[in-house]
Amino acid sequence: METTIKTLNPESVRPPVASVGILGWMRKNLFNSVFNSILTILTVYLLWKIVPPFIQWAFLESSWHTTSEQCRAGDGACWSIITRNIRFILFGFFPYDQHSRPLVAMLILFTLLGFSRNRKHWKKHLGYAWIAGLFAMGLLMKGGVFGLTSVESTQWGGLPLTLLLAVFGLTAAYPLGVVLALGRQSKMPIVKVLCVLYIELIRGVPLISLLFMSSVIFPLFLPEGITINKILRAQVAIILFTAAYIAEVVRGGLQAITRGQYEAAESLGLNYFLTMRLIILPQALKIVIPPSVSILISAFKDTSLVVIIALYDVLKTTQSALSNPLWMGYSKEAYLFLAILYFLGCFSMSNYSRKLEKELSAGG
């Protein structure tokens, strides 16, 4: 008995065009109900009303390398406020003929940060590279040796100052926050009470108050003739403030670790220090990566608050450029430029945290 096999045309067995590809995705996600369909149409309408005019204002009719008078004659964005004042915005009152020094210092910092993104580089040589890099950055900014002109810290400003406050503040705040979290979990009453008082006191006041205290109140308690650098005082205030919030996040991670982990460490004969370093903290810090990064991002943005104590970070230098009568009225362009700078910093931190979280999860 012969069996006849019928061959089907591949075109006849393919799914409908409306259920696959772009059309299928749109039907499933954008037009899967009446309510979603209305929202999609309204969103497209708003984008059509906003995006084309913005593109025309920001790019097609914009001015990039013109004078302020020529900007006022046009209808588009005046990006000349940035291009004509870029060196002051980035470097503040740092001597004009020495701008290559803070530029090289920032390049060193970006290189170290980029190199540190890869966990394979987390070895001793990376620590030595950071020590050498920080020494070189301080030497470039301060000067006074190797033929470099000495520059007082009061002349530091712009983007280097923002990066200085952010990078060093966040780097120092995290380990301090971990220590405070461990102290709050301590069985020693004095240590626990002191950590609780510190954390609750700092979290109960805004960062602005700490900055004012570091700038105005703290110098009143110093002996006559002794002063502490204003940048250092602001840096310490940011570190102390951020550490208190980090401590609470890490404490939540410590509470998520089951009692069995502690008992397993005790059965191996590990002391408190080894238990925390090898077993408890690696698990707890892995758990709290998302909330920790949220706090660090907030702290990075809060560095702009130093403007209230007359430190010329990148926000203050931009505002100073806008105070020039020639460039008044172009705040939209200036603050959009600032928003892009802060977005790049925050997005880089968020993106790296997701990458690190995925690597740690894959590694168990």
Image (tube, grey):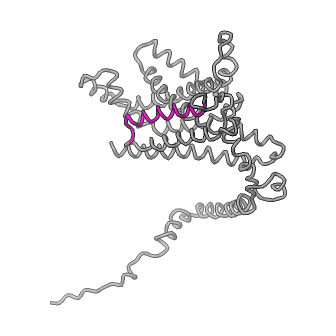
Left of 210 or right of it: where is 326? Answer: right
Looking at the picture, tell me which residue is in the foreground, 99 or 23.
Answer: 99
- Residue 114: x, y in percent? 48, 44
Q: Would residue 15 be counted in the magenta stretch?
A: no
Q: Residue at x 67, y 16 (%)?
A: 219
* Residue lying at 81% horizontally and 55% vertically, measured from the top left: 71
User: Residue 347's spot in the image, x, y percent?
Assistant: 55, 46
Report the magenta residues as a range: 121-141
Residue lying furthest left: 1
Q: How many marks?
A: 0
> Where is residue 244 drawn, in percent x and y?
53, 26
The one of 231 and 41 positioned closer to us in this rendering: 231
Residue occupying image coordinates x 24% and y 25%:
268
Q: Nearer the viewer, residue 253 or 342?
A: 342
Q: Is residue 122 magenta?
A: yes
Residue 146, image quadrant: top right
The location of residue 84, given as percent across then percent down, is 74, 49
**Above or below, comparing residue 285 to residue 218 in the picture:** below
